[in-house]
Every structure is written in structure tokens, then in C-alpha cells.
Amino acid sequence: MNTKKFEVIYLPVGVPTFHLPSAENEFKKSAELLTGLCENTRVSEKMLLSTDLLNAFMDTADPDLIVLQNVTFANAAYASEVLHRFPEVPIVLWALREPVIDGGRLRLNSLTGAYSAANTIRQFKKEPLTFIFGAPEEEQVRVKLAAAVAAAELKLKLKSLNLAAIGHTPQGFGFGRAMDAEMLKVFGVRLMSIEARELIERAKAYSDEDCAAYLADAEARTVGLEKTPEKNRKDFARLYRAYDEFVKENGIGALASRCWPDFFTSFGTPVCTVLGVLGDLGVAAACEADAYGALSMYMGMQLTGQPAFFGDPVSLDENENTITFWHCGTAACSLARTDTGAVIGEHCNRHIGPTLEFGCKAAPRVTIFRVGKSPEGEFRFLIASGEALDKPKQFLGTSMTVRTDVSAEEIVKKTVEAGFEPHYAVIYGDAADSLEILGHMLNLTVVRF
């Protein structure tokens, strides 16, 4: 498992023939901004105004993100040295705004330097380049840099992720079935596989006393669990313990679990509420064995520190400009509206509980996200942004209604026509910029609305 501490390296390159007092001022402000965004940012004591200084400073670093800034003009030789030393490390290229335009001397000529650097970088790297233009005190610069830092840190975290596929996807749900070699190659993620029956058998072996603490924990998180028939309530606690111990024993950060029909037919109690509780424990848990859905949830949860909703787009309201996302009852308990709490009910089709039954709480910013595949089999990201509305439960199960920033009708029309999958993570928070940058760092197609 990768235990490396995330590191950013700031490379302020230039030449001494421009206005050094102006360059020094921008250098100090830029360093302060970057160290504020990531405390483990490696900053040189002075500007790197020769390739010798640049190479000497790079000798001290093991970066996961490079911020290459033209503090003045620098020719392409500087970028070439960076690429030679760190060919696989993501680069953010930053050009500074001219501090003064008064008809006199060109103080920095940073933008021209960025053109020179970009020309070389694009010859070395296939992935899209992350470029930032502006002064360090500008808010849009801070936001874009923060998004890039978060994306690079998430890219490193993926290399430590163990994702478990518990059982197989149901017939007709193959879009969620992952291959271990692909997961490792593209994302650096280790995919583990286990049969659902193994966890069912593990759950059956526990006594009521073995699972009493798990039942009490779930009762504290939910509303109305005591109304579930006693056998289903106790069997749910057995499943909760089985999943919790499996996660802890194997260092699982995300899982995709088979649900129907096995847990109804072979165990008699659904796994839905177990997956919801795991979300509150920081484990991204998707149902219907959708491994890419679980990966999508994990990415969002790492960026925001909150559980992500998982569901199908089931309703479009053109007048309201909303898409409603729904699933049978697996949302994290903490996502429930405060006026209802995480209500317990029974499955809408099988009429067996416990499942979760609530509308999700409102949020000013949410991000709709999916790691999926194109019809040609290439990985791609789907990203859209919006607002989660203050809506009660829309259908039996758990639901969330999102008013999108752009036309909801266009999102639905274009994603259906492009063959996107029917499962999405809805992330609490604005994670769109970081996800887009991460997609570029991984050299994946990004479709953003």
C-alpha cells in the first residue's frame, strides 16, 4: 500500500534580465499562497533563475504535483529539465499577469514564457495541460490552484485504495463490472473480489449477543428501526457486523455490493441499510455491485469529506430545471432531511426491511459525477453541477432533486444519447473543477456540463 506523504513542488523559473524586484514580489506572494493551500509545499529560498539552480532544487524533491511558474520569461529549456526529471508527475503551468502596464519596461514577460513551456510540455505529455493565468492575490487563481492540489492529492490517494466487489453485477448491469487489471492500470486502485454468500454465511454465524452493539449503533442513527420485524432487525445487525469487520480486516475504502436478489432470497433481509451506515463511517458503498459507482462515490467523498448519494436519474422536470436521483434505500443516514431523520422502512418491490426511506437534505452546491466508459470501452468522466433542493421523499426509497446549473433537459438528452450509465454519485459540495483536472491528469475524456 502506498504510504507516501503528498508533496507539491513550486518552481518559480525565470532569467535575471527582467525586473527582479517585481518578480521577487510575485514570488513571495505565490509561495505564501501555495503553502497555505498545502502545508507540504516545497519552496526554494530564492527564484530559480538558471537551469542549474532549477536542477539543484529538484534534487531535493519527490513531488506529486509540480507548479511551474514563469516568474519572468524563461525559455523552453527550463520545462525540458522538469520533464526530464519528473516525466510522470502532473504539472500546473502558471503565468503571472504583468504587474504594471505604463508604456515603459515589460517587467516579467511571464505569459510568453508560459507559451514556450507549454509548447514543450505538450510534446512530452499526452494529457491536457492545466494552465492558470493571473496574480497570486486573485480569487480565481486561488480557486484553480486549490482544485489542482486537491486533484493531485486524490490521484495519490487512489493508489492506496482497496475497492471490494462483493458478488457479481445482476444480469443487464454489466456497466458496473470492473476488471482488476484495468482498475490498477488506469487509477492505481486495487480491486478485491468476494462472493456475496461469503458475507452472508459470516453473518449467519453470529449470535444476537455478538451483534447487539451494532444494532444499538444503527438504532441511534436511524428513525423507526424498532418497527422492523424482530428477525429482520437482528439479521440486519448480523449483516452490519459482517460488512464492518470485512472492511476493517481488508483496509477497504470503497465497496460495490450485490444486493438483489440474494439478500432477499438467501438471507431474508436486505443489505440496503448496511450500505447507508457504511457511508456514514467513511466507506463509499454502492449497491447492485457497481464498482465504478463506488469509485465515483469515493472520489467525491475524498474531495468533500462528506458521504455521497448514489442513485439513478429517474425524473426530469423541464419547467423546474431539475433531475431527481433515486434508489431503493441505501443513502447515508447523515444525508437525511433534519425534519424526518433517516427513516427506516421496507423495500419498495420486495416489501422486506430494513431499508432507508427519506428525502435528502438541501445543499447550495452539489456535483453530479460518474466514472464510466464510452461505447468504445475508454474510460470517461461525466461532471455536472447544481443545487440540491429542499424536497421531501419523492418515491419509496431515498431521493434527491437537483436543479442543475445548465439545462437539465440537455444533460438528460445528451447523456442518454452518448450512452452514459444509469448510476451516478451526487457529491455534497463543489467538486467539479478538481474532478475535471483529475480526469485530465489521468488522460481520460471529460464531459462537463
Image (spheres, rainbow, N blue to C red):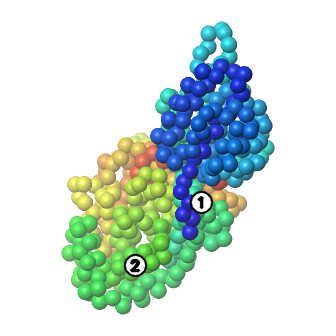
Question: For residue 24, which quarter of the picture?
Answer: top right
Residue 205 to residue 407: above or below: below
x and y, in percent, of residue 63 in the image: 62, 51
**Viewer-side residue, 208 vs 373:** 208
Instruction: Characterize the local packing of mark 2: few (<14), some (14-19) or many (20 or more) Cα atoms within 10 angstroms.
Output: few
From where the camera sits, is residue 394 visible?
Answer: no
**Viewer-side residue, 38 vs 302:** 38
Residue 210 to residue 29: above or below: below
The residue depicted at 31 percent of the width and 59 percent of the height is 334
**Viewer-side residue, 111 vs 306:** 111
Residue where numbered disc 1 is placed: 372
- Tell me the number on the disc at residue 245: 2
The residue depicted at 41 percent of the width and 41 percent of the height is 319
Labels 2 and 1: the sequence-earlier one: 2
x and y, in percent, of residue 415 in the image: 57, 52
Instruction: Characterize the local packing of mark 1: few (<14), some (14-19) or many (20 or more) Cα atoms within 10 angstroms.
Output: many
Circle 1 — which element? strand
x and y, in percent, of residue 164 in the image: 51, 73
x and y, in percent, of residue 97 in the image: 60, 24
Quick check: 40 left or right of 226?
right
